[in-house]
Amino acid sequence: MIESAIHFPILSLLIAIPLLGAIALFFFPNEEKEAIRLTALGFTLVNFIVSLLLLLYFDTSTYKMQFVERYQWIPWAGVQYLLGMDGISLVLMLLTTFTAVLAVLCSWTAVEERVKEYMIHLLILEVGMVGVFISLDMILFFLFWEVGLIPMFFLIGIWGGKRKLYANIKFFLYTLFGSVFMLAGIIALYLAHGRATGVYTFDLLKLYEVTYTYNVQWWVFIAFFLGFAIKVPVFPFHTWLPDAHVEAPTAGSVILAAVLLKMGIYGFLRFNLPLTLQASYALAPLVVLLAVIGIVYGAFLAMAQTDIKKMVAYSSVSHLGVVMAGIFAMNQHGIDGGVLQMINHGVSTGGLFLVIGMIYERRHTREMGDFGGLSKVMPAFAAFTIIIALSSIAIPGTNGFVGELFVLIGLFKYGVLPGAVAIIGIVAGPVYMLGMCRKVIFGKVDNKENAGLKDLSAREVITLAPIIVLILWIGIFPGHFFDLTRASTAHLAEMIKTNEAAMEAAGRTGRVSFVIPIKPRVYVGPGAFKELEKGAAPATR
Amino acid sequence: MTIAQGLNINLEAVLPVILTAMLALLVMALDFFVKKDNKAVLGYLSLIGLIIILPIAAVTVSPTAAFGAMVIADGYSAFFNAVFLIAAIFAVVLSLDYMKKIDSERGEYYYIMLFAVIGMMVMASANDLINLYVGLELMSMSFYVLVAMRRGSRGAEGALKYFILGAFSSGILLYGITYAYGFTGTTNLAEIARMGANLSSPNHYLLIAIIMLGAGFAFKIAAFPFHLWSPDAYEGAPTPVTALLSVGSKAAAFAFFLRFFAVSFEAFHPYWVTFLWALSAATMLFGAMVAIQQRNIVRMLAYSSIAHAGIILIGVVVKSGNAAAGIMYYLLVYAFMNTGAFAVVALLARGNGTGEAIADYRGLAARRPVLAFVMALFLLSLAGIPPTGGFTAKFFLLASAIEARYYWLAAIGVISTAISLFFYVKVIFYMYMKEPPEADPSAPVAAEPSALSYNIILLITALSTVALGIYPTPFMDMAIKAVKPLFM
């Protein structure tokens, strides 16, 4: 059943295209590498174009889910095939389909072995990522979440670097550990909703309609938090990220940075905030604390790195701390900035991994000390790298500036201390990023091996050009992007405000400091679930 | 009323058993006429027979208990009969090539396998402890012989361990039956249930009976600490027998004991639930943790099968209709994914008994991409990763446990699943991410084994594993319908 204005299952189509691509590639002979690459590129491009079509029909004035498709799947357990999207899903979906095209392009010459399998894994990865952003049924969401994990496991494990096995096991165990908790949270929510209303369903829109008791919210928040915080990753769950980034092939790093990490943040926006609002509100100081630590800690670790890729990986930890801090500042500016910063991070860090991949393909090293003076040998490469690096450190005029500005406004509104500490981390950005540019791009060509390097090929320029366009477009006309998500973020901010007012009316003042205001009631033992069993009082928001 | 009416002779209730027995006897008779190097003919005959019996068994349902209430052929037993027959069909197909490879092709192999299936069917539809015992012994005796079919010390060791411990546990089980009979004066399950419900306080003799029957049950499903036989028997047996042993005999034990615990001894639930709770938790954790250290893939799958038994036991503890349906669904999925994994093992094993180390799977993906892919699929399904059947089945069981408020048992189930990921993923690691072993120049270049029978099995099991994960509704509906009369 398609419950939308356009009578066409466009969201299913977005899942089906890469899946069909993967199946089609299965029948190609292994030796036809060029044909395999072109086919994969074709399917990802078509998917990107179809996702752009969504923009024509998308209604930016509502936070409600659009293009909804609903089919019964396992009726007696309340599982449905339920798809739909709002503004936040839309921008992340566009980022996904866009990144998939770049991922195929940047693997053109970098991957020569087992090309067919590689491309199949990339396309299945796209299926999982697209599915995550548009599922409105929790089981369906979980399914796509895991589907995205397996191809990544193979991408790192087969085409990765020297320590790929170690990095891979770490990545896999961390994420699976998180998703097990997430599943527990999903089931708890399902039961709490069922006991409150008598309707057992995994339908997210139905689950939204109930306000759960604080204790249920607290437990569900923690379960989801573990699942999503590992994925983001929030300090102190970040240790898998640098290893995975360094060992992954270029396309793997790009997708990991641009999309997979966003799945965690999307989870916070889609599940934690709306479903467990009161618990989120109460625990926000803790999350902001971790996020701010991440901003500073990631930045300082990035300064100490000599491997370019590792440096960018740690800068990712710092940037994602910014996003998390923005969202858990719990006000309109913070959430707006956080959502935009998600896209910015995808574009600029994705871009950085692309240029690192290009230079690594030429020199097979990523040590900053091995380079120097590349601006003389590879002027185009130098220009692209510098623009992307500037966007990453949020120079005005680039996309990063707008996002960080809004996050900081939100964060200062939330409290001066976290805002001030976050600034320290953000100021450290130029130190490591420009330091890298100085060592790699400027100076003299003092290593003979660098003297003969070829500048970017046409394909590489085509890969990087859209990134530059996006950097400037978001930097100069951020309104175009804010408009897409504004209705959804405004709805979230409105919910938070209403809740805040209700709590003040009830005599419980909100929190300003890092101290947890409402003492979380933690029981150990079966008694912990007593309130869960009682369920929640049905009430509409 | 004639005697026949009093006994309620209803041949329909035992139709699948009769048909399988006829098939087994036919194979046995023909064995005398088939030449020694032609025994595969008997395998094909058994295969065709089983394929014909499968649809008949799946739909044969006669609601009332027959033969003096000894046998009950309800939807529940029909579902299990289908699982046994599916597992047996796979085992026979695998045997066609494998027995030739290990040079043990014999006629009696096939009809003894059929006898084992008859034993399983008798257990699934047993409504009486005597009938259970007959079925159990028929199945066990057949398996003692089947495990010993591989020549050499490994087969003998496995079979002897299995036989001695099995005989011992049968004795305990029989002892438990005498207690039940001694107190209630009947061996009929429904009668025992009536007596139990009438008691105001627990009867110690009945509790002893429950414990002893429970121990016999724990032995059959290889629950910790009754598991000692299983890794050796699994390793020693011909791989197709291992597949049937791990799927069929386990499913048969669950089929009867779910009926026994949840229906006959429902009144005693508060007593046996503690015993089974601890058994389930210990089995899950033990199986998963010990499997990590295994170097031989068959032994690893043996311990993994122990862990799976622990997880299925959750359903017996929970004892609700949803949990029972979950068990049935789990066993159905298990029949496909486990047989699939054993099929790959059987395909890659060499005649002299090597090729079963996990290290031998190094670089398999480079040599045989499709084979490595399906093996990865089975392993991920065993580990419970969506979108495979293993995830769906595990999800149903754990959800039923949470629904019935067994939170800690569900949590232990989740933890054991997380631990077990490690060893399943390790094999995938070896297949995809390690370099293949250096070829030994002195060894003769072995042709890569492959046979049509394997391809068919792998295709069917792989497709079913995925299909059961993505679209469980029809089979789950069937299971729920089947358990309704038992749990309402």
Image (cartoon, rainbow, N blue to C red):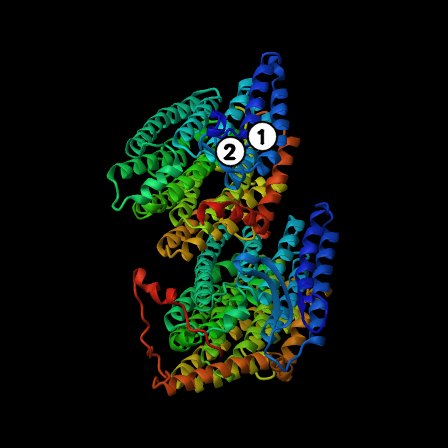
Is residue A301 visible from the viewing direction of this image? yes
Q: Which chain's residue wears label 2?
A: B
**Looking at the image, residue A430 lies above or below residue B480:** below
- Residue A189's mark? none
In which image quadrant can residue B210 be found?
A: top left
Q: In this view, does A517 lie to the left or right of B369?
A: left
Task: Write the residue at 35% across / 32% down.
Answer: B186
Q: Which amino acid does label 2 sit on?
A: Ala
Callout 1 secondary element: helix
In which image quadrant can residue B41 be found?
A: top right
Which residue position holds label 1?
B94
Task: Write the residue at 60% across / 23% down.
Answer: B43
Q: Which of A353 and B279 is in front in this view?
A: B279
Q: Is residue B177 left or right of residue A281?
A: left
Which residue position holds label 2?
B243
CB atoms of marks 2 and 1 within 8 Å: yes
Badge 2 local density, few (<14 within 10 Å), some, or many (20+)?
many
Q: Which amino acid does label 1 sit on?
A: Leu
Task: Write the residue at 52% across / 71% down.
Answer: A270
Q: Nearer the viewer, residue A283 or A199?
A: A199
Callout 2 secondary element: helix
